[in-house]
Image: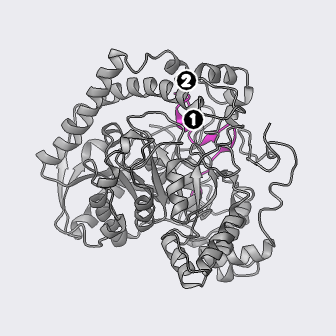
Amino acid sequence: MMSRDRWIRSADGDGSVGEPFGSGGTGWTTRAASALAASILVGGLLGCSPQGSPSAPRPPLEQASASGPVQEAYAHLVATPRSASDLAGEMQSGALTSEALTEAYLARIRTVDDAGPTLNAVIAVNPDALAIARALDEERASGAVRGRLHGVPILVKDNIETLDPMATTAGSLALAGNLAERDAAVIARLREAGAVILGKANLSEWANFRSQDSTSGWSAVGGLVKNPHALQRSACGSSSGSGAAVAAGLAAAAIGTETDGSVVCPSAANGVVGIKPTVGLVSRAGIIPISASQDTAGPMALTVADAALLLAVMAGTDPSDPATAEADARREDYTAALDSGALAGARIGVARFLAGYHPPTDAVFDAALKEMEAAGAVLVDIDAFPARREVSAAEWIVLKTEFKAGLNAYLATTPETVTTRTLDELIAFNAATPAELKHFDQSIFIESAAAGGLDDPDYLAARERGRRLAGPEGIDRLLADNDVVAMVAPTGGPAWTADLVTGDHFLGGASGLAAVAGYPHITVPMGGVKGVPVGLSFFGAAWSESRLIGLAYAFEQRTKARLTPTFALPDLGELPLAR
């Protein structure tokens, strides 16, 4: 039984928000002070019309960046969010307090996520957020500043444990009682740097590793995340809420996780920056696992500078995660890589084999390449990588095997309030819980339950083969053979129409090689297709985060291609529904 002060939002599949779990019903009524005062504050912080007050002029609808009309009822909610770096600077100067900023984001969540467009990006709000922000303000007033994130409110994907009074559910009703007694290692580092944990972000349930017919962004706990640029389109996943929330100005930044594509796809689909670091740079301790070989947390933010700042805080060795043994020796101050001239003279491989699935996206990509050349980059076409299918086949064996082992080990550490303590018990729970299976099945759960153990010869061979083909004989060889320092490709096509009947309709993507190799990958906005964002991916060798951040920053500063969400309802005939 969940204690009355530990709230978590629930929603059914149509995205309607339900009551908090547990007894009592006051969790949402105490989240902020006067709605009018908060709305004025939100306007000033997010770049709305003057002062953001209800009487102020609304932004002209013709300035909308998404295809189709902006709904009149939502026009006053259109705002250009401000970067975490800018907001941190204002707090440092004394022009802004963390308490006021946190209150503003809570008000924005109420008006955009709980009501209006009802994005469903936030699955739970931290009831202690304002108190934490107030305490951080008091620390600053006394002369104590924890770090560059002091007082900055961030959202955390709901497969990452925090010590705050919020369950860590992975979007599953089976984990409604999973109130962690620890911070995940990455959360501890963020807190040490002064971040305010504002709440938990919705996600594709079980980080999109339950069904082959899933709909990205849907969870039984949080409902379906909507893309703030085009409400009928997918926010991608599995870090769906993290991407949508950052784009819509619900937090200064967010933390996502990736096994294959789950940071970069929702970042690109929602028009923000995402970094999937080298596996082992950031600890996974306290994160609900899929794959020990590929899992990592990563920052999702409005700008490359914000993402670099977050990554510098998140990176580091953790004795509880052996994969991070080299992290302290490898980590850098990634903000030092922010060089607007980084493209000049850089030889960059153009991964043509990761494009060509959607001509309008290719057109945006070609325009991005011309901008890179104009900035002095030397581009080298790379037309083929024959081993892609072999890499994918090996990955599938690895993921199923490691998921079974890792999830069973994780569930054994959860509180007694979690009664499903093995993958087999989760399968039984879902079968007995209509709300879990009303939109798609649990085929991946069932296949994973039948997988062998970590000593299975087929698994061991697949793990070695996948890593070798994607890493030393993949990315490393392509870089060396073509004498390039990184590769670029479209992160993916524009977001498809969200579909709870037939599932996802991916057009294509660039995440696979870096994911299987465990190498870094960053996506940055490169523009849009009929107003729906598409991202540009930079990926390269292990531990090359600084190089990639520099290149991405230079592109970002040259193009300023990020779009402002307008909560539009696009013409469904203008963008592809499926491959």
Label 2 packing within 10 angstroms: few (<14), some (14-19), many (20+): many
Residue 398 located left or right of residue 114: left
| Mark number, residue 396 | none
- Dot 2 or dot 1: first in sequence order is 1
Chief secondary structure of the magenta span? loop
Say if residue 575 shows up in the picture: no
Quarter in which the C terminus is drawn: top left
Tell me which amino acid carries mark 2.
Phe
Mark-to-mark CA distance, 2 and 1: 10 Å
Quarter in which the N terminus is drawn: top right
Residue beneath the point at 63% across and 25% down: 421
Q: Secondary structure at mark 2?
A: helix
Does the magenta segment cover residue 558?
no
Residue beneath the point at 43% across and 65% down: 309
Q: Is residue 382 above or below residue 453?
A: below
Say if residue 188 shows up in the picture: yes
Tell me which amino acid carries mark 1.
Trp
Front residue (pair 137, 215): 137
Residue under numbered circle 2: 445
Asked if the residue under mark 1 is in contact with the one under mark 2, i.e. CB atoms within 8 Å, the reply is yes
Does the magenta segment cover residue 215?
yes
Residue 306 located left or right of residue 20: left
Residue 273 percent location from the top left of the image: 44, 59
How many numbered discs sit on the rendered protein?
2
Residue under numbered circle 1: 206
Residue 176 percent location from the top left of the image: 71, 37
Residue 416 percent location from the top left of the image: 70, 31
Residue 153 located left or right of residue 307: right
Question: Where, by quadrant of the figure, is residue 110 drawn?
Answer: bottom right
Residue beneath the point at 54% across and 57% down: 254
Question: Where, by quadrant of the figure, is residue 355 drawn?
Answer: top left
**What residue span does the magenta drawing correspond to?**
206-229
